[in-house]
Amino acid sequence: MIALKKWLKSITLFFITIMMLQSCVAYQSTPVSLEVAASEVKRTKIITTSKKKYYYKRITFEEGQFYGFEKLNGNMVKIPIDSNEIVNVYIQSKSKSTWATIAIIVIPLFALSILAVVETNKSFENNLFLVNKKVSGL
């Protein structure tokens, strides 16, 4: 039982750490043009005619060509974007991203807190039952 509790604590701490380090990106629900995405310095999701999704750190417009910046092997790489292949362009919604990150952290912590309280209460009731049984047996 003690080993199980230690294991559960370790797993819980691991997941809490992972969740806190995770950053959630949510995109606006209404598509924008490439020009708007280039003017805003935000993460961008592009959906092509072949239903492929591309995620870029930002979009720029240089010399009549749109470019998406992506991080590969620790370096920012400029990738040309074919504007004829694009169906929709979505930019990051900072408020949705913030709320999603908070929800990802708070909801599991709340659930774990409730679970810990319930388990502690059960353990307390079991111990109280055993004490009452010993006292009444005297």
Image (cartoon, helix red, strand yellow):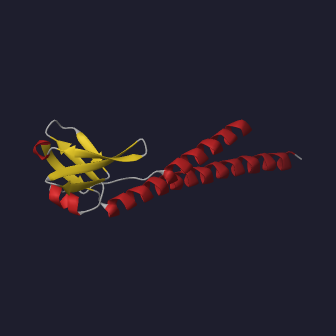
The residue furthest front is 63
**Residue at 16%, 54% in the rendered image:** 63
Q: In this rendering, does residue 120 appear at all?
A: yes
Residue at image position (43%, 53%) is: 23
Q: Nearer the viewer, residue 57 or 64?
A: 64
Horizontal side of 1 relative to 87 (left or right) equals right
Q: Is residue 1 something one can see in this rendering?
A: no
The mark tally for this picture is 0
Q: Quadrant of residue 6?
A: top right
State the image coordinates of residue 17 (x, y, percent, origin top left): 56, 50
Nearest the camera: 58 or 48? 58
The spot of residue 4 in percent (x, y) is: 67, 37
Give the residue at the far right of this rendering: 138
Considering the image in quadrants, where does the N terminus appear?
Answer: top right
- Whether 68 is drawn above or below 28: the answer is above
Q: Foreground: 24 or 13? A: 24
Left or right: residue 117 compared with residue 3: left
**Is residue 126 shown left or right of residue 11?**
right
Q: Indicate the position of residue 88 as horizontal and vertical percent values.
A: 16, 49
Identity of the residue drawn at 42% across and 56% down: 101
* Foreground pick, 17 / 85: 85
Q: Residue at x 24, y 41 (%)?
A: 53
Q: Which of the 4 quarters of the picture holds residue 42?
A: bottom left
Horizontal side of residue 132 vs 55, given as left or right: right
| Residue with the most extreme left position | 84
Residue 125 location (% of width, % of height): 70, 50
